[in-house]
Amino acid sequence: MTDYLILGADVLGNGPTDLVLRDGVIASLGADTAAPRDGVELVTIDATGLVALPGLVDLHTHVREPGREDAETVLTGSQAAARGGFTCVHAMANTEPVADTAGVVEQVWRLGREGGYCDVQPVGAVTVGLQGTQLAELGAMADSAAGVKVFSDDGKCVSDAVVMRRALEYVKAFDGVIAQHAQEPRLTEGAQMNEGPLSGELGLTGWPAVAEEAIIARDVLLAEHVGSRLHVCHLSTRGSVEIIRWAKSRGIDVTAEVTPHHLLLNDDLVRSYDPIYKVNPPLRSADDVEAVREGLADGTIDIVATDHAPHPMEDKECEWSAAAFGMLGLETALSVVQQTMVDTGRLTWEQVARAMSSKPAEIGRVANQGRPIAVGEPANIVLVDPSATRTIDPRDTASLSRNNPYAGLTLPGEVVATFLRGRATVRDRALVTPLVEGQVTA
């Protein structure tokens, strides 16, 4: 057991405060001393210049286990999450076998508990085998030990309107939410990149914005019709932002996420034909990037979610058309948000905490995550050095995969400590000094 005294942390960017973490909770705020307890190590951390945020919550992570442990496991994905400041991730259902039964979601949940680096909350499939025709065991997954609340066929769209309506109706019984991968399949057959002048120039099949926007428009109307919760995954176009804004103005119960890569990168990078930039939905135009930043800043887009999508080398280091869709995101998400939203004045750190902690926890109905930094609350905390910079090296990762689109870029901010219920899952040893002479601090 270890108690932590954190000195001078800038809580939510609102000024320096001392914190004591004890017995898994925040024991005090504003105290500058903490008495050692018999048999309990007491460690002090000088957090001067560091921002303290509640542990981050990701609503959209691919951990690949079971079935593709060559790309990622629950353990390595959890370790990557902790390094990125996350204390909870939602593991998407497109594993092998698909997480469409209580047995599979419980397996993922238990692997997360055994690893202990962050809480791993499984996302259940909407349809059997992600095939889009027959509803999966939604109720059984909700009633399982994993307590699934979020259901998604992510990687595929629930394109049949009748199936989508039934899913929205079904999850109302246990306060679930359907997280839709908005991609009209007929409009994206063979699509390789964002549709526009550049796709024609490069000779790559275009992926039209309307393929995303048409599904979002349909689904917000279905959600309104049945009175259910809808969440839109990885929104990426200006039109999508406008549809969500319209839906919220009507009082429709819809939330939406944007990924870090859609906040920072645009389709001009595809000129390199480097498959590291191949992702679903595709990198969009510079105008779309500006639109999603505006949407996140004004609250139209509720959260940032990583869509962390690891792939083994052979699936990405090949010709563009054969490469898998997806990018890593857990270890760089907070830095990208700092660069695009905080350092530009669009978001405060307190607003970042909402978009990356409290709101995703609320959407996923995770009771003990995304809580405020207050006395008696679970000690899920991340300490960030906003003045640090780092050049991204794909080899410096906890993930088993290396498909990092930020390789070689210098990004601001660095996570220096992450605490899960008062236990350090990441801790920069240079920050730790003995509180009492001779005390062990390693």
Image (cartoon, rainbow, N blue to C red):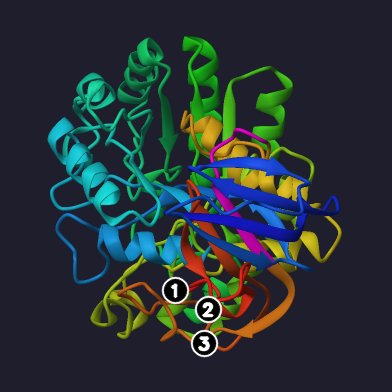
Q: Would residue 399 be counted in the magenta stretch?
A: no
Q: Name the kind of residue labelled 3 in the image.
A: Ser
**Residue 265 falls left or right of residue 407:** right
The answer to whether residue 286 is above or below residue 57 is: below
**Which of pointers 2 and 1 indicates the residue nearer the eye?**
2
**Residue 216 falls left or right of residue 295:** left
Q: Give the range drawn in magenta.
A: 375-384
Marks 1/3: CA distance? Answer: 12 Å
- Percent coordinates x, y for residue 417 in the rendering: 57, 65
Q: Name the kind of residue labelled 2 in the image.
A: Val
- Percent coordinates x, y for residue 80 in the rendering: 42, 66
- Which comes before the other along the chain, label 1 or label 3? 1
> Closer to the camera, 177 or 144?
144
**Answer yes or no: do the residues labelled 2 and 3 have beta carbons within 8 Å?**
yes
- Provide the residue designation for mark 3: 272
Q: Can residue 231 be seen in this view?
A: yes
